[in-house]
Image (tube, rainbow, N blue to C red):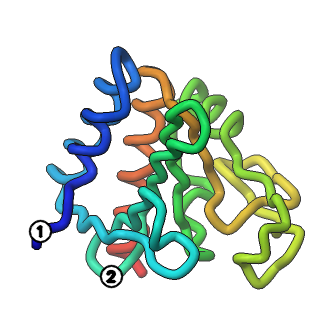
Amino acid sequence: MTETKIEAYIKKMFIGNDLQNALEFVAFLRENGMIFERGTGYWADKLYWMIKYHNGYVCFILIDNEKINDWIIWSDDSGSECFTDFSINEHMKKIAWENVDFCGNCGSCEHSGGTSKIIFGKNFDKVCITTFKFINPNDENLNCLKELVQIRMKGILNE
């Protein structure tokens, strides 16, 4: 039995810009050599994918049909410093800063309450290990998200 691809769920659950943006983002990830793995453990019965590049996680995608069909993307930096002072334009910095993922005390990281992180030259406290969280990203946020993925890819290659 073959695994249903994420695109099938996206086409089933979304319309309009959400459909277009979700498919565009997944296509971008595939074009850049990402590996899609279904979630395990807590995430096993959810529409959750862990996105890998080489041996490192780049992001995580949840299609949340328990709410109003949200799609959520978390970045992953796994403690790397790839977002610390990477040079991006001010507009993209602003979007990234608006989408910093602050700790919700879910217990999934070793630093309950989050950690301090410098993100594109600005200090943030109580940040989740995933650094960024985008919910139903619009076109502008999607462009920023793609740039963040490319930064993480470079970080993985330099680890």
Report the residue marked by disc 2: 55
The picture places residue 5, in percent across and down from the top left corner, at 20, 55
* Side of 12 where 49 appears, left or right: right
Q: If the image is split into quadrants, where does the C terminus sit?
A: bottom left
Q: Is residue 154 visible?
A: no
Please report the residue visible at 33 percent of the width from the left and 82 percent of the height from the top. 55
Is residue 26 positioned above or below 157 on the image?
Answer: above
Please report the residue visible at 66 percent of the width from the left and 39 percent of the height from the top. 99
Q: Of 149 and 7, which appears nearest the observer? A: 7
Is residue 80 positioned above or below 71 on the image?
Answer: below
Is residue 122 positioned above or below 95 on the image?
Answer: below
* Side of 97 where 82 appears, left or right: left
Is residue 22 positioned above or below 26 on the image?
Answer: above
Report the residue marked by disc 1: 2
- Quarter of the image holding residue 13? top left
Q: Of 42 and 151, which appears nearest the observer? A: 42
Closer to viewer: mark 2 or mark 1: 1
Q: Which residue type carries mark 2?
A: Asn
